[in-house]
Image: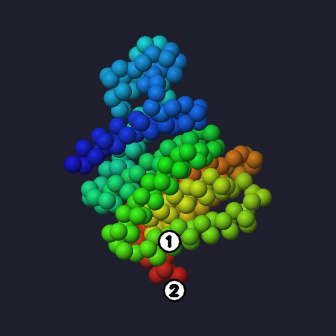
């Protein structure tokens, strides 16, 4: 079953690559079918096998020999691995579906942010709509409306304050706030707090390195750190939160 999940992850990762390439160009993700960005030749099924096609074709287009970015197999492999890890942690159920959907949105947003330094609301909106649907399902399953509302309000207030306090710096912006709002629809306030904490640490470390190297005006894409922090929080958030509480009592 784990291998099947990995394969599904790589297939979806291939679709994520389409989203990553086309959304910033304001192109449809459904039409035209997958094609070479250089010669525009429509790709055949053998050209679209996740990871393997890139390896067999030695990272080049079959038709015009244009180099194909290593981003494509990397995203496919990464998505397959992440899906498998989530499956091994939670099994195959509503949590698996919910978390893989969230991570899918974060992967797309993170890579686009890394490439363009921009968070597209169209991607965030899909995540928000999906989160609302999962929240409604959770209300029917757990009958806990207060917890769901709390998980939305708390990060919105905290992150709003952070943006107000740091607006003169090149830190988190409205796009990052959108990402955290959608995350809050999928996980508990506790996990959101851990995700925020880890994201700031990861982003801070990289920012410090960039600053020390003299690139002081370089824009930092923050969504990749949010995505990484959220993945770790989903997998180990409860343990991290309890560990922090235990050391803070001393």
Residue farthest toward the bottom in the current orientation of the protein: 250
Q: Quadrant of residue 164?
A: bottom right
Q: Which residue is at a point 50% across and 15% down the rendered structure image?
A: 39
Disc 2 versus disc 1: distance between alpha carbons? 29 Å
- Residue in front for this viewpoint, 120 or 195: 120
* Spot occupied by residue 93 in the image (x, y as percentages of width and height): 28, 58
* Spot occupied by residue 107 in the image (x, y as percentages of width and height): 48, 46
Q: Secondary structure at mark 1?
A: helix
Residue farthest toward the top in the current orientation of the protein: 64
Q: Is residue 226 left or right of residue 54?
A: right
Checking the image for residue 149, the label placed there is 1
Label 2, on which residue? Answer: 249
* Spot occupied by residue 122 in the image (x, y as percentages of width and height): 55, 45
Q: Is residue 43 left or right of residue 89?
A: right
* Spot occupied by residue 146 in the image (x, y as percentages of width and height): 46, 76
Q: Which residue is at a point 51% across and 86% down the rendered structure image?
A: 249
- Residue in front for this viewpoint, 211 or 189: 189
How crowded is the residue under tag 2: few (<14 C-alpha within 10 Å), some, or many (20+)? few
Residue farthest toward the left in the current orientation of the protein: 1
- Residue in front for this viewpoint, 215 or 122: 122
Compared to residue 128, the image places residue 33 above or below, namely above
Q: How many discs mark residues in the rendered view? A: 2
For marks 2 and 1, the one nearer the N-term is 1
How crowded is the residue under tag 1: few (<14 C-alpha within 10 Å), some, or many (20+)? some
Q: Secondary structure at mark 2?
A: loop
- Residue in front for this viewpoint, 177 or 205: 177
Compared to residue 50, the image places residue 153 above or below, namely below
Q: Quadrant of residue 77?
A: top left
Disc 2 or disc 1, which is closer to the eye? 1
Q: Which residue is at a point 68% across and 68% down the rendered structure image?
A: 161
């Amino acid at each position: 079953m784990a291998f099947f999940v990995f394969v599904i992850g790589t297939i979806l990762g291939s679709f994520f690559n389409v989203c990553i390439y086309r959304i910033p160009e304001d192109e449809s993700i459904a039409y035209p079918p997958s094609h070479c960005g250089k010669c525009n030749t429509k790709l055949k099924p053998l050209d679209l096998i996740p990871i393997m096609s890139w390896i067999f074709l030695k990272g080049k287009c079959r038709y015009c020999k244009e180099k194909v970015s290593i981003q494509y197999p990397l995203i496919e492999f990464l998505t397959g691995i992440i899906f498998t890890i989530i499956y091994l942690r939670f099994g195959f159920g509503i949590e698996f579906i919910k978390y893989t959907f969230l991570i899918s949105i974060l992967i797309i947003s993170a890579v686009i942010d890394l490439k363009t330094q921009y968070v597209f609301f169209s991607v965030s909106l899909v995540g928000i709509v999906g989160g609302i649907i999962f929240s409604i399902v959770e209300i029917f399953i757990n009958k806990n409306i207060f917890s769901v509302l709390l998980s939305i309000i708390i990060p919105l207030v905290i992150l709003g304050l952070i943006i107000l306090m740091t607006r003169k710096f090149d830190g988190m912006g409205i796009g990052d706030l959108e990402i955290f709002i959608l995350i809050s629809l999928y996980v508990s306030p506790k996990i959101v707090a851990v995700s925020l904490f880890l994201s700031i640490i990861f982003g801070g470390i990289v920012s410090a390195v960039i600053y020390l190297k003299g690139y002081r005006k370089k824009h930092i894409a923050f969504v990749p750190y949010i995505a990484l922090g959220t993945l770790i929080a989903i997998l180990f958030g409860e343990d991290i939160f309890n560990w922090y509480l235990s050391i803070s009592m001393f």
